[in-house]
Image: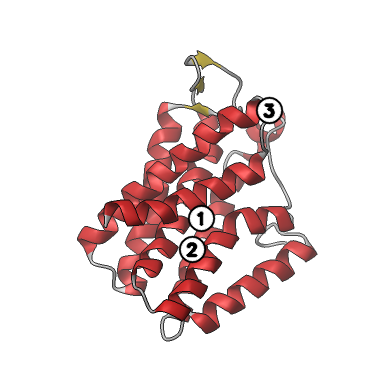
Amino acid sequence: MAGTFMLDKLGFLLALTMGAIILVLGYPQGMQMLMLMFIFLLVSVIATKYGTRSKKKLNIFEGERGWKNVVSNGLVPTVMAIALFFTGNPMFLLAYVASIASITADKFGSELGIFDIPFFLWGMKKVRPGTSGSVSVLGTLASLSGGFVISLGSVYLLSIPISTAFFIGLIGFMGGFVDSLFGILEEKGIGNKFTTNFMCSLAGALMVWLVF
């Protein structure tokens, strides 16, 4: 199973621990919340595997992930599940969904956007595919679709109203854009892809309080 989700052993054990926390503390919706995370894992693998040959030629293919990937993507959703358990505030459920929508939007944008011409946000100059802080038309559309994959999944799994899910999809897209903004700093030697991914998921969760 670790190989299926492209995680090394430590990363898989950490993901398993976070999954158990979400499952138990998310009761009575713990299973549905966990299934939403599985959707992220599944579509992320598909997006990563897409165009593998081309990505390897560009030297930007990411194979097995480790514990840092798990923490940067999974810590915020796990904390939101814990906060939901202790407070009972449904806003934390929306924040949970929004954080996953954000990391999914980022994953779609980064993995699929490389097949278009990328422009660095600072100055909008053309850069090589895979450059942090860059965007492309295809990547933007892919990012938007990634956010809505999760928001629509929440309608079915968590009975989130469609109108609310629509805004969560947009929040996910904006979270993916925040990732690109922090990618500018990453290219300048401030932070790394893990801190950038963490800020993406955190931004998605925090934006819930600005929108709802």
At 60% from the left and 79% from the top, the residue drawn is 20
Q: Position of residue 98 (x, y in %)?
A: 40, 57
Q: Residues within 10 Å of mark 1 (few under 14, many from 20)?
A: some
Specify which label sits upstream in the sequence, 3 or 1. Answer: 1
**Front residue (pair 134, 188):** 188
Asked if 152 appears above or below 148 in the picture, the reply is below
Furthest residue toward right:
9
Q: Residues within 10 Å of mark 2 (few under 14, many from 20)?
A: some
Can I make out residue 38 in this image? no
Q: Give residue 79's quadrant in the image.
A: bottom right
Query: What is the distance, in whole Å, between disc 2 and disc 1 at their CAs?
Result: 6 Å
Query: What is the distance, in whole Å, between disc 3 and disc 1 at their CAs?
Result: 22 Å
Q: Are marks 2 and 1 in contact (CB under 8 Å)?
A: yes
Secondary structure under tag 1 reads helix
Identify the residue under disc 3: 58
At 46% from the left and 48% from the top, the residue drawn is 203
Q: Amino acid at mark 3?
A: Leu
Q: Is residue 51 left or right of residue 92?
A: right
Q: Position of residue 106 (x, y in %)?
A: 50, 44
Specify which label sits upstream in the sequence, 3 or 2. Answer: 2
Q: Is residue 98 left or right of residue 199?
A: left
At 50% from the left and 19% from the top, the residue drawn is 122
Asked if 68 appears above or below 61 in the picture, the reply is below
Q: Amino acid at mark 2?
A: Ile
Identify the residue under disc 1: 43
Identify the residue under disc 2: 39
Secondary structure under tag 2 reads helix
